[in-house]
Image (cartoon, helix red, strand yellow):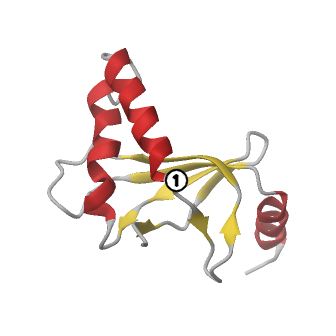
Amino acid sequence: MIIGHSDLEHAESDVRRAWGAFRAGVGYELVQPVFRLFSGAVSRDGVTHDPALLERYYNARDRLHLELIDGDGNAIETTTIHIVDYSSGDGQPDGVELDVLISDDAYWMRRQKEESTPA
């Protein structure tokens, strides 16, 4: 099931992190409550308000076994996939981001090559 899409417009290759706007797919509403646990535990400014709820989020997120798949259908190795969802929870979230720690060397080589190629 595809829960959404992102172009991962931003990257910090030195920490192997990429993030970008998240466009929810048909299946996102099934997993959205997991990511809303995070927004209940941590305020937008990053201050943890509820460590127990944050622990519930980490456990629930890890049980989802999410995968990052490229446009050609190939899996990209990740260590963490996080959807930052402070939306109102009304279906199509506004301002939601996908934030991923990517351990896949091939991904970073492709990205570096794409970014160095003139448009």
Look at the numbered disc 1 and give the secondary structure of its residue. Answer: loop
Q: Position of residue 101 (x, y in %)?
A: 65, 46
* Quadrant in the picture for the C terminus: bottom right
Q: Give the total of numbered labels.
A: 1
Is 68 placed left or right of 51 in the picture?
right
Image position of 30 with respect to 57: above or below: below
Residue type, numbered disc 1: His
Residue at left offset 31%, top offset 16%: 49
Q: Quadrant of the N terminus?
A: bottom left
Q: Is residue 72 above or below residue 58?
A: below
Q: Residue at 34%, 18% (x, y): give it.
A: 52
Q: For residue 39, what is the image quadrant? A: top left
Residue behind mark 1 = 65
Q: Residue furthest front?
A: 63
Q: Residue 25 appears at what percent x and percent y?
A: 34, 71
Q: Residues within 10 Å of mark 1 (few under 14, many from 20)?
A: few
Position of residue 66 measured from the top left corner of the image (x, y, whole percent) = 51, 57
Residue 111 lies, with reference to residue 73, above or below; the image says: above
Residue drawn at the location 68% of the way across and 75% of the way down = 74
Q: Nearer the viewer, residue 3 or 97?
A: 3
| Residue 22 x %, y % | 41, 61
Q: Is residue 45 visible?
A: no
Could you say which quadrant of the image residue 107 lies in?
A: bottom right
Q: Is residue 102 visible?
A: yes
